Structures are given as C-alpha cells and as structure tokens.
Image: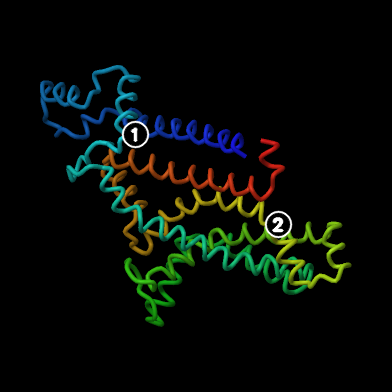
C-alpha cells in the first residue's frame, strides 16, 4: 500500500508542476501585462520601469522559478485592481464554492444511487425505462437552463426559496440540485451497469443459495463491488463539478471563487486568475489522490496492478 501511495503522490506532484507552468504561461500568452497596467499615453521610461518592477526583463525560466518559489509560500502577488493579496482574495471565496460542490455531489448521490440500484433490479421493466429516461433528460438539460427554471418555479411563482445569495440552508437547495443533476445521470448508469454485472456472478448466486436475505445480497455484496467504478468516476467528475459551479454560481449569484475567476478574467486581473487556477487544480488532484487511495483499499488488485 505504501508503494502504491508513493506512486500516486509522485503523479500528483507532476500534475501540480504542470498546472503551475500553465498558470505562469497565462501572463505570457495574453501579451505584455505592462501594457494592461499602464495608460495608453504612458511613456517609454514608465514602461521600462514597470517592466523591470514586474521582473519581466529576466529570462523566462528565472521568472517561472520566482513565481513557483513564491507560490509555494502562498504569495501569488497582489490584485492589479484592489491591491489585495491574490491568495487572500481567493481563500475568502473558496469556502462557498467547496460547500456548493460538496452539496452538489451529495445531491447527485441521493438521486443516482437509489435510481441506479432500482433500475438494475427491475431490468428491462417500466421502472428501468423510466430511470433511463430520467438519466437521459438530466444529461440533456443545460445547467443554466435548469437553474433558471428552478428560480422561476420555486422563487418567482411559489416564493418558497430564495432566488439567489448565500447564507442559509435554503440558499443551497436549488444550486445543489442544479449541480447534482449534472452529475447524477452518469453515476446512475454506472451503478445500474455495475449492479447488473455483479448480480450475475457466481458468488451472488452462492449467497442466494445459502439463503442470504436479498437486501443483504444487494447492499453488502453487489453494491460494494459495483461502487468501485462509481467512486473513481466521482473523483474524476469532481473537477467537472467545479467547472459546472462557474455556471451555477453565475445563475444564482453565488459568491464563490468561480465567479471571482470569471470576473478577474474579464478585468484581466491575472494574479488572481493564476492563484485561482493553481488552488483549484490542487484541490482537484488532491481529491483524485484520495479517491485512488480509497479504491486501492477497497480492491487490492488495483494497487497491485499499479
């Protein structure tokens, strides 16, 4: 297990280094940042002064080393618009995004697990077809459209839930369901196919022949083995949930890091963008690292193969 964990940790470090290079390249891809900071009538002397002040007169590898060494210490520079440390701005907006993403993940599981198991046990029946139709509909609905529909129904017409904002548990319901509906279809299909496959195996038939209760067969034997690909996909989909949070936060005016990143891109506030990209990437690869460890514990064959 230690060797498997070390192997996964090395992969995590490689990914983080690659993401840091990508974040550093943002400033060089968009052009000369000094031209964005200075007014159009600025002279050459002022341009040269800012160019040297930002360290852009040094070789690229020196600039990257300086950026990476500071980033490790949590120093991504200051926002070009608020003159506030970028790391502080992103950390202030990170909890709402993580809360929303976690709530969306829970909502997806609450929808997908019972529907997937039910569809597998009632294979080729009306219930199975209905669950499949729900999955297809959920996959086809754009996040922004579903969010707007929920606002119209529950906030405008019924007046039972707040249309936007952040604070109480009621503010979580519509954004979490919107985000969860994005992940639930693929999770439901994985649960269904996994349970169907395992229910036809020898040890399931043996357990039934021994007189084990059907609920125990399904929950303890079938679902436990079927959840391995589900856990793996959930780890991979966590990044997509963070991506979907950008749309969800915009629709529901959620004060998270996703909306901060979009606003910073619009304002060309690239120190904040760099910080947000690196921290979000760190969270995603850390979640995948934990998922790999969990899967390795559940199924020893995976870590042995790795």
Q: Secondary structure at mark 1?
A: helix
Using residue 271 as the reference point, say whether residue 21 is left or right of it.
right
Crowding at dot 2, Cα within 10 Å, few <14 / some 14-19 / many 20+, comes out as many
Instruction: For the N terminus, give its image quadrant.
Output: top right
Coordinates of residue 27 in the picture (x, y in percent): 31, 31
Q: Quadrant of residue 280?
A: top left
> Residue 264, image x and y in percent?
29, 45
State the residue at coordinates (74%, 69%). 216
Image quadrant occupied by the C terminus: top right
Residue sitting at x 72%, y 68%: 119
Residue drawn at x 43%, y 34% as measured from the top left: 19
The first of marks 2 and 1 along the sequence is 1
By what rule are the colours in the image chosen?
rainbow
In contact (CB < 8 Å): disc 2 and disc 1: no
Give the tally of numbered discs.
2
Q: In terms of image quadrants, where is residue 124? A: bottom right
**Rounded to the nearest whole Å, what is the CA distance between mark 2 and mark 1?**
39 Å
Q: Identify the residue at the far top of this view.
A: 59
At label 1, counting other C-alpha atoms closer than 10 Å, the crowd grade (few under 14, some 14-19, many 20 or more) is: few
Q: Is residue 120 above or below residue 265?
A: below
Q: Nearer the viewer, residue 162 or 142?
A: 162
Q: Residue furthest front?
A: 2
Q: Which residue corresponds to mark 1?
A: 72
Q: Pick whichever, 126 or 43, lies toward us.
A: 126
Residue matched to label 2 = 226
Res 129 → quadrant: bottom right
Image coordinates of residue 21 in percent, x first then y, are 40, 29
Element under label 2?
helix
């Amino acid at each position: 297990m230690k060797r498997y964990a070390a192997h996964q940790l090395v992969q995590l470090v490689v990914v983080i280094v690659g993401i840091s290079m990508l974040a550093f390249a943002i400033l060089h891809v968009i052009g000369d940042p000094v031209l964005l900071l200075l007014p159009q009538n600025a002279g050459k002397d002022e341009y040269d002064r800012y160019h040297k002040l930002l360290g852009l007169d040094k070789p690229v590898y020196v600039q990257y080393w300086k950026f990476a060494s500071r980033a490790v210490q949590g120093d991504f520079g200051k926002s070009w618009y608020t003159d506030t440390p970028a790391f502080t701005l992103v950390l202030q907006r990170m909890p709402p995004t993580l809360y929303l993403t976690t709530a969306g993940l829970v909502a997806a599981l609450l929808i997908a697990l019972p529907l997937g198991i039910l569809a597998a046990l009632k294979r080729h029946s009306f219930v199975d077809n209905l669950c499949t139709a729900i999955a297809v509909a959920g996959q086809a609905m754009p996040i922004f459209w579903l969010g707007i529909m929920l606002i119209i129904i529950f906030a405008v017409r019924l007046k039972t839930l707040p249309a936007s904002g952040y604070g109480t548990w009621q503010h979580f319901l519509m954004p979490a369901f919107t985000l969860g509906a994005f992940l639930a279809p693929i999770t439901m299909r994985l649960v269904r196919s996994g349970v169907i496959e395992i229910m036809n195996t020898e040890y399931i038939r043996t357990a039934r022949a021994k007189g084990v209760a059907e609920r125990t067969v399904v929950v303890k034997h079938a679902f436990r083995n079927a959840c391995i690909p589900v856990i793996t996909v959930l780890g991979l989909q966590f990044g997509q949930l963070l991506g979907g949070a950008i749309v969800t936060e915009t629709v529901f005016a959620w004060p998270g890091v996703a909306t901060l990143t979009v606003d910073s891109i619009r304002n060309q506030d690239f120190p904040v963008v760099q910080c947000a990209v690196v921290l979000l990437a760190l969270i995603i690869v850390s979640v995948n690292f934990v998922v790999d460890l969990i899967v390795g514990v559940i199924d020893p064959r995976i870590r042995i193969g790795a």
